[in-house]
Image: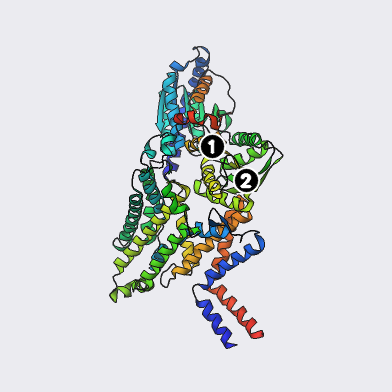
Amino acid sequence: MRKLSLLVIVMAAFLALVACSSATSTTEETASNTSTEAKTMENLTVGYAQIGAESEWRTANTASIKETAEKLGVDLKFSDAQQKQENQIAAIRSYIAEGVDVIGFSPVVETGWETVLQEAKDAGIPVIMVDRRADVPRELYATYLGSDFVEEGRKAGEEMNRLLPDGGKIVELVGTVGSAPANDRYTGFRDSMAENIEIIDSQSGDFTRAKGKEVMEAFLKNYGDEIVGLYAHNDDMAIGAIQAIEEYGLKPGEDIKIVSIDAVRGAFEAMIDGKLNVTVECNPLLGPQFYDLALRAVNGEELPEWVPSEESVYYPDKAEELLPERQY
Amino acid sequence: MTRSRFSWHQLRDSQLFWPLLALALILLFNLFFTPGFYNVEIKDGHLSGFLIDILNRGSILMLLATGMTMVIATGGVDLSVGAVVAISAATATVLINPALATELISSEELIKDVTSTPLWMCITAALLIATLCGLWNGLLVSRGKIQPMVATLVLMVAGRGIAQLITHGQIITVYYTPYFFIGNGYLLGLPFPLFIAIFVYLCTWLWARRTAFGMFVESIGINAQSSFLSGINEKNIKLAVYTFCGFCAGIAGLIYSSNVKSADANNAGLNLELDAILAVVMGGTLMSGGRFSLLASVIGALVIQSTTTTMYAIGVPAMAASAIKGLVVLVVILLYSEQTKLVLTRVVERVGARS
């Protein structure tokens, strides 16, 4: 009920807004694009509506957005929606009222954003979606910046090809069944995997250490020394599997090559011990890329629908020096 | 003729019969369809194989099922055991290395194999907190007169939050080797958790069957009002079973965290309460309370673990695993339904009559 009445009020307000400002806003828009000079980082004002702090990944993401703003001299208005869509909409409205140059946000849910994004568009403020994507028409947002899970899987596949030049039988620990990262990392890996590598078994470890260990134990009982490689959809499952491999009496990282995704701290510790061969990053430090896109959007540049976040691949030789810098 | 029918009835009426039948069916399936399922070899001085895995992994569930049986026998239920597992795991691991939760530590310092709290204190503290959680449930149910499902739901939801507060939202990794023995050690070639589970089972059995306690529990489960009128202190008995259930979950938490050498407040013991309830139900104890069998619940736990391990062993695709597990549960639960039993009995009788 409350939501419905809220919606009605919002619609009414929106109609009124369109009615009285349609004439002026278009002229303002063209004026700001042509007459004023190109914006720089120093005089850029950004409003950022964050979801909340639901995971370590998000915490690192928030830290990156804030710290990069400070470094670049961007004027950042930041809000934390505590996992509520109402809060995020309210925050975006207030940014529109304040007249920021760009709005960035990670939509907490996929639907229900048309109205507020239309308001932002009418006010001539480009919107960039970060990490998550809302289900809205293309013209309502400037671009989407986020991880490409398929690409992560593809990179993992390439690393596996490199580690196993002669091929062999490998096993796979799948993430939570049905989740986007699990589905995409599954397909991506198979895209780039060499023909002489064969995935002999693939089971879900639910992205957790305990399940990863349990499933790996079963893999080892079934196939034993046949297994020469392991592909885990995240680091935690790989860490669990490493324990299972050690208890079975094989050497993780040597007898069984291991590739995983995420690049969290535990993975770096495992790489230092030589038990993990490669971890492909799922980067939360999106700050620098975000402000770069924001500036380009403000200066009227046409941006692609989706900009994949910059992600790296980490190897054991660099692990020791990188560990202290890891923020998550 | 009459003799064979009599023994069939006797067999059918034993609470142990149905879970044993379910276990036998799963093991029989594996005999034909899973090559190598029964292979047991000696590795590093201990036994290793799928059967050992079932006993090892099943210990946690056996422990939880033991505690849960007592609670369900009083006509209650404890939904919070999974969360208590997480709290216990978080407490023990944080005490071993409190700094891990709040700051970054260099890897040299980590592998020093030291603990900042003596091991016995970590274990005692974890068990104490878990027991307190159980006591809290017991107070809500017995003194607060809140329905058990609602009362324990509070801790089921809040418990993971408490565990996260303890670990500061981090996954705590343990590097202290003596702690690993609880969940990874071997005694006489068999996994150590199994000995813990059997020990707790025996103690509970003595407590329930060699004292009048078990009878009190059953009488409350059948009719709380008349038990009260006949002089049974219903409140204190309920308090005791919930507290005990928390204690069992505490031990399970220690085994869990020791086994994966870490504590993950979000995922430790996730959905375990449902498996524990299922184990008790498979053991033939009614959700409405009354007659219970600890051994049947423990076998129920083994049935669930055997199903899981079988999935891994035959390599069911990840996407299908949950659906197939559900199917197995359905078949087993159908075995328990009075209607099915009736049909089965008729079939057996008819076959008996023919021969």
Mark 1–mark 2 Cα distance, whole angstroms, equals: 20 Å
Taking A271 as reference, is B75 left or right?
left
Image quadrant where one finds the N terminus of chain B:
bottom right
Give the SS element for disc 1.
loop
Q: Position of residue A182 (x, y in %)?
A: 58, 42
Q: Residue type at mark 1? A: Gly
Q: Position of residue A268 (x, y in %)?
A: 50, 35
Q: Residue type at mark 2? A: Val
* Foreground pick, A230 / B21: A230
Taking A323 as reference, is B347 left or right?
right
Which residue shows up at 47% across the image and 48% down it? B260
Query: Measured along the vertical axis of the image, is residue B165 above or below residue A290?
Result: below
Image quadrant where one finds the C terminus of chain B:
bottom right
The local crowd at label 2, few if under 14, some if 14 to 19, many if 20 or more residues have their Cα within 10 Å, is: many
Disc with the residue nearer the chain's start (1 vs 2): 2
Residue A125 is at least partly visible in this image? no
Which one is in front in this view, the residue at disc 1 or the one at disc 2? 1
Query: Measured along the vertical axis of the image, is residue A55 above or below residue B287?
Result: above
- In the rendered image, the residue lying farthest to the bottom is B2
Query: Measured along the vertical axis of the image, is residue A91 above or below residue A212?
Result: above
Q: Position of residue B322 (x, y in %)?
A: 57, 54
Disc 2 marks which residue?
Answer: A171
Q: Position of residue A17 (x, y in %)?
A: 46, 28
**Chain of the residue on which disc 1 is drawn:** A
Give the SS element for disc 2.
strand
Disc 1 marks which residue?
Answer: A274
* Foreground pick, A234 / B112: B112
Label for residue A226? none
Which residue shows up at 72% across the image and 39% down it? A195
